[in-house]
Amino acid sequence: MEALRGIRGLVVDLEGTLYVGDEVLPGVKDALSALRMTKLPMRFLTNTTSKPLHAIVQKLEKSGLEITAEEIFTAPKVAAEILRKREVKRAYFLLKEAVIEDMTGIEAVDRGAQAVVVGDLGEALSVARLDQAFRLLLEGAEFYALAENRMYRGADGMHLDVGAFVRALEFSTRRKATLLGKPARAFFEVAIASLDIPPNEIASVGDDLEGDVAGGQGAGLKGVLVRTGKFREDELASDIRPDVVIDSFADLPALIAGASC
């Protein structure tokens, strides 16, 4: 409780923290409503690159979770902002067509790319697509990853995630990708700037020890780990130390209320 004393804002993960697949986790709706009543500002951060922002918003609305598009920071949305600042205008995307629409200001090209951007292509991923990315990287294109997650939990269990394909390209090109999604500090800094609150007064809440907790702590936030989604008990033996570990997001309002007393 003491670790969250003075918290005035939250950045919250979506998949695995508020819901798994199409199922909202128990107590989440009430917890979200309780936090809204306190006027605590929140931003919702996700490394999901399989769906465009508008589809995520529709999913949340259908699930009864009142979260606006302005409060959501997806890896593609943040990456586009960062790349525009770096004057990247043309890129080769390992991304679904619908998601590329969120990369506003960046033209999708197959040749002459200034950058290769790796995300989730799902079943459309092929050796040919990876090979094209490989060749462009050899030609000098900048190398970016929207996420490096090793795995994620879907409604039917655990799945291989984007990080495996990023590592394949890194191995073959002997180059290191610049990460633009969680746990990159730059990703969190975009959300922090929108809250206009000092980082040490914000908590990052999620089920991913590396992406949500370590990533948030690296940007100066408190790290709150939830025992839902991809969480595994053996992770608590890691060198990464959450400031707080709770059973679920449903426990957060009481914890914050207690810390403010």
Image (cartoon, helix red, strand yellow):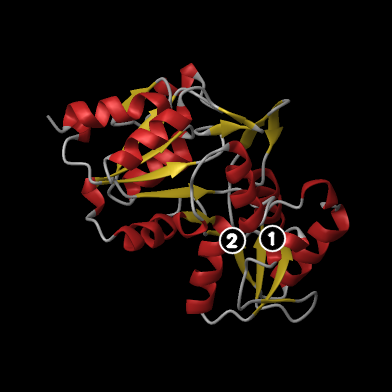
Position above or below: 111 against 68: below
Position above or below: 251 against 105: above
Q: Residues within 10 Å of mark 1 (few under 14, many from 20)?
A: many
Instruction: Give coordinates of residue 247: x percent, y percent.
Output: 41, 20
Report the residue at 22% width, 55% height from top: 198
User: Mark 1 or mark 2, which has the lower sequence index?
Assistant: 2
Instruction: Give coordinates of residue 232: x percent, y percent.
Output: 51, 21
Q: Residues within 10 Å of mark 2 (few under 14, many from 20)?
A: many
Q: What residue did someone put label 2 on? A: 76
Q: Quadrant of the C terminus?
A: top left
Q: Nearer the viewer, residue 65 or 169?
A: 65
Q: What residue did someone put label 1 on? A: 99
Tell me how far mark 1 sits from mark 2, CA to CA: 7 Å
Q: Amino acid at mark 2?
A: Pro
Q: Nearer the viewer, residue 198 or 209?
A: 198
Where disc 2 sits, the SS reads: helix
Q: Give residue 255's quadrant in the image.
A: top left
How many marks are shown on the rendered structure? 2
Position above or below: 215 against 16: below
Report the residue at 47% width, 60% height from top: 70
Instruction: Give coordinates of residue 234: x percent, y percent.
Output: 48, 18
Q: Are the residues tagged 1 and 2 within 8 Å (C-beta)? A: yes
Q: Amino acid at mark 1?
A: Val
